[in-house]
Structure formats: structure tokens, C-alpha cells
């Protein structure tokens, strides 16, 4: 999994009207406040648990480009997650055996959902810009940036 240097982003819970689209921007902690991830929640993607509001909770994993996503109601449509890793990219120390440079690690990297026994199910990705990776999320869980061992 892709390591992260510097200060981590903090856990965030956002309450919103699920009939309206919402964008959640996570930033690394001060002093740099660099963008960590952007989560786009389309209208109707989260069903309200009760009443007319819903929530999404995003919990970044300290020291890694990984985050857990949970919602107050059912996830009824895909969310779009974009990691921005330009400022705090740090290839894991054990990756040097397979990837001789951080650039090679970046070229092999993808996004995936963390599953049992430390397995990662890789997802289709796009790269909207250099050092950004975008993918869709259709279920609550933990999502990571990683390269095959």
C-alpha cells in the first residue's frame, strides 16, 4: 500500500440532504492543508436512515493513502473517490525489491477495496491529473492505493 508522509487528514462526518449532490474535500492537517481526497456523492446515492438527512463518514488511515467509508443509510448509488497524492507520496520501503524507483511504483499502482486476510480487490481507475487516482465506490469499506507485490 502507498505510504504517506507528513500530517494525515482527519476523520470527517458530513450530514446532508441526500436528494442533493454533495462533494466532500479532505485535506491533510495543517500546516500544509494539501488535498488528500475528494469524495463526490451524487444525488440519491445515500438513502436516508431516518427523516430527510443522511450522513457519510470518512476515516483516513494514518500513514497511508487509504480511507474507510461508511454511511448512515444504504448506499444506493456509486460514490466517486479521487485521491490526490502528489505532496505526500511515499513508496513503501519493501517495494524497492520489485519497483526500483518511486515512478515505477506509481506506474504499477491502482486503487482497490481492502478485503479479508489483507487481500485487495483492485477497481477500474482513471487518472484525471498527474498524481491523482479516481475510482467509484459501490459499498462501504476501506479503499487503498497499492501496487501488486
Image (spheres, rainbow, N blue to C red):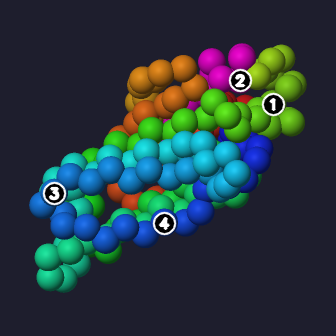
Tell me which label, 1 or 3, sits earlier in the chain: 3
Magenta extent: 103-113
Give coordinates of residue 64: x percent, y percent. 69, 48
For the question of whether residue 54 can be seen, the reply is: yes
Relative to the observer, which residue lies in front, 3 or 27? 27
- Marks 1 and 2 in Cβ contact (< 8 Å): yes
Residue annotated with mark 1: 95
Q: Is residue 76 left or right of residue 127?
A: left
Verify CB contact (< 8 Å) between mark 2 and mark 3.
no
Q: CA distance from mark 2 to mark 3?
A: 38 Å
Q: Residues within 10 Å of mark 1 (few under 14, many from 20)?
A: some
Magenta region includes residue 100: no
Q: Are marks 1 and 4 in contact (CB under 8 Å)?
A: no
- Disc 1/disc 4 C-alpha distance (Å): 30 Å
**What residue do we see at 16% from left, 57% from top?**
20
Residue 20, which numbered label? 3
The local secondary structure at tag 3 comes to loop
Question: Looking at this view, is 46 or 24 the one in front?
Answer: 24
Kindly state the secondary structure of the residue where label 2 is placed: helix
Residue placed furthest toward the bottom: 50
Estimate how packed mark 4 is, as few (under 14), some (14 to 19) or many (20 or more) residues with alpha carbons within 10 Å: some
Spot occupied by residue 1 in the image (x, y as percentages of width and height): 68, 41
* Screen quadrant of the C terminus: top right
User: Within the magenta stretch, is there residue 107?
Assistant: yes
Question: What label sits on residue 12 in the rendered view?
Answer: 4
Q: CA distance from mark 1 to mark 2?
A: 8 Å
Q: Residue at x 81, y 30 (%)?
A: 95
Residue 144 seen in this snapshot: no
Q: Secondary structure at mark 4?
A: strand
Amino acid at each position: 500500500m502507498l505510504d504517506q508522509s507528513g500530517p494525515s487528514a482527519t476523520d470527517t462526518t458530513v450530514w446532508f440532504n441526500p436528494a442533493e449532490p454533495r462533494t466532500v474535500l479532505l485535506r491533510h492537517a495543517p500546516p500544509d492543508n494539501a488535498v488528500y481526497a475528494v469524495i463526490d456523492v451524487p444525488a440519491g446515492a445515500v438513502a436516508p436512515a431516518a427523516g430527510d438527512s443522511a450522513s457519510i463518514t470518512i476515516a483516513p488511515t494514518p500513514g497511508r493513502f487509504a480511507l474507510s467509508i461508511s454511511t448512515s443509510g444504504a448506499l444506493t448509488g456509486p460514490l466517486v473517490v479521487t485521491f490526490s497524492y502528489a505532496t505526500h507520496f511515499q513508496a513503501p520501503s519493501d517495494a524497492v525489491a520489485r519497483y526500483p524507483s518511486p515512478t515505477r511504483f506509481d506506474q504499477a499502482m491502482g486503487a482497490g477495496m481492502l478485503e479479508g486476510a489483507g487481500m485487495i480487490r483492485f477497481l477500474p481507475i482513471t487518472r484525471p491529473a498527474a498524481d491523482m487516482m479516481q475510482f467509484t465506490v459501490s459499498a462501504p469499506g476501506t479503499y487503498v492505493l497499492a501496487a501488486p507485490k
